[in-house]
Structures are given as structure tokens and as C-alpha cells.
Image: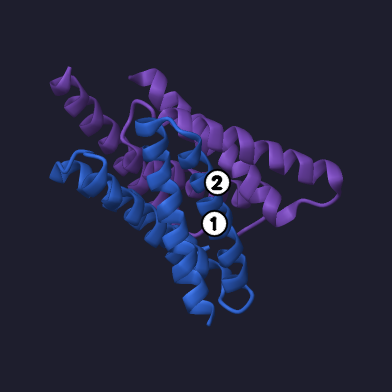
Chain colours: A purple, B blue
Amino acid sequence: MTKEWIKVFFAAFFEVFWVIGLKHADGPWEWTGTAIAIAISFYALIAAGNKLPVGTVYAVFVGLGTAGTVLSEILFFGEPIKAAKLVLILVLLIGVIGLKLVTDETEGERS
Amino acid sequence: MSWFYLILAGIFEMTGVAMINSLHKNKNWQSFVLMAAGFGASFLFLALAMETLPMGTAYAIWTGIGASGGAILGMLLYGESKDWKRIACIAIVLGAAVGLKLVS
């Protein structure tokens, strides 16, 4: 099951690139990179939905993508660090871990 | 009008997510085309909504409608688990994501 979850994390990782690309890309190379990141990210997203429940996969994809984008904006684009952001990222990660535990449990029951 | 665009964008995103399910179940090209069209239309209407609405608000509402709607459709139409623990975790993740988009 872990292999399937890696696909979700992979999709979210590339989501961060294209969200930043859509906002900051300038010139043909950066736009090409953004388009490639969108393609990789959606390919991994769809592949992960083959074994894992799609609702779960999409929630984790959106959640981790958002957390990654917020962190990148702080680290690389000089956005201010706010306590609220860090708390929400922590809550989000707890939810993702919870989803992984719950999903593995129900998948185990089925097989 | 921009709120109408935003809700429409959310509904198209829901459709896109549901079509990922349909794609794996039916394995046909119609699902793939509908999925691509759903996400495409979703981005288009999101962009239209963002012309007048603040970006953080628009993004947060779009995510909220699309991802929670996609999860609900998955449970209603595609037999995904209705376990309360799963629903609670999805709500935590999406709630935090919406919050993040509102504060940043």
C-alpha cells in the first residue's frame, strides 16, 4: 500500500511546482516547465486513484499541495511566517497521517 | 457573477474528481475526455472568478467545493468507505487547506 501513497506524495510535490509556476512563471521555458509539472502531477494523481479511494487521494493531494506551496512561498519568496500557517500545516499533516492509517486498515479488512 | 463562476468552477472540479473514479472503473476514453474537460473548465471558471474576487478566498472556496464534493460523490456513486474516521480525516485535511488559503 505504501507504494500507492508514494504516488500521492509525488503528485502533491509536483503540484507545488505548477502552482508556483502559474503564479511566477515568466518566459517560454518556465511556462513549459509548469506544463510538464501539471502533466506529471495529474498522471501520478490518476495512477494513485487506481488502488486507493479517489476521494482520499484528492483530499491529500490538495492538502499537501497547499501546505507545500505555503511553505515554499515562505522559504523562497519572502512571504511572512505566521503562527496560524504553521498550526494549520501541523493539523493538515495529522489529518493526512490519519487518512493513511484509516485507509490501510479498511484495505486490510477487505483483502 | 463572479460567485456564480466560482461555484461553477467547484462543480466542474467535482466532476473531474468523479471522472477519475469512472476512469478506473470503466476504463474508457469517454471518462478520460470528461475528466480533462472537467478540470479544464474548472480552471477556466476559477480564473474568471479571480478577476474580481480576492485570490485566497476564491481558491479556498474552490478547493472546499471540489475536493469535498469529489469525496461525497466517491461515497455515493463509487462505493468508497463511509467510515466516520475517514470522513473526519478528510474534513481535517480540507479544513486546514481552506484555512491555509484564507490566511496566506
Report the residue marked by disc 2. B36
> Label 1 to label 2, Cα distance in Å?
36 Å
Residue occupying the point 53% across, 62% down: B104
Residue at 55 percent of width and 32 percent of height: A43
Which dot marks residue A81? 1
User: Alpha-carbon neighbours of circle 1 within 10 Å: few (<14), some, or many (≥20)?
Assistant: some
User: Are the numbered discs 1 and 2 placed on the same chain, yes or no?
Assistant: no
Q: Amino acid at mark 2?
A: Ala
Single out the mark in the foreground, 1 or 2.
2
Judge whether residue A84 can be spotted in this image.
Answer: no
Chain bearing tag 1 is A
In the rendered image, residue A68, in percent from the top left (x then y), is placed at: 53, 44
The residue positioned 33% from the left and 19% from the top of the image is: A1
Image side of residue A106 versus residue B7, left or right: left
Instruction: Write down the chain letter for disc 2.
Output: B
Amino acid identity at mark 1: Ile
Residue B13 seen in the figure? yes
Task: Please name whichever residue, B78 or A55, is drawn nearer the observer in this view of the structure.
Answer: B78
Q: Observer-nearest residue: A41 or A75? A: A41
Q: Position of residue B29 (x, y in %)?
A: 51, 35
Establish if B11 lies above or below B6.
above
Measured as percent of width and height from the top left, residue B78 is found at: 26, 41
Q: Quadrant of residue A100?
A: top left
Is disc 1 in contact with disc 2, using a CB cutoff of under 8 Å? Answer: no
User: In the rendered view, would you say B44 is above or below A107?
Assistant: below
Which element type, helix, strand or loop, lies under badge 2?
A: helix
Residue lying furthest right: A27
Residue B36, position in %: x, y? Answer: 55, 46
The crowding category of the residue bearing disc 2, from other C-alpha atoms within 10 Å (few below 14, some 14 to 19, many at least 20), is some
- Quick one: which residue is furthest to the bottom in this view? B1
Q: Is residue B55 left or right of residue A5?
A: right
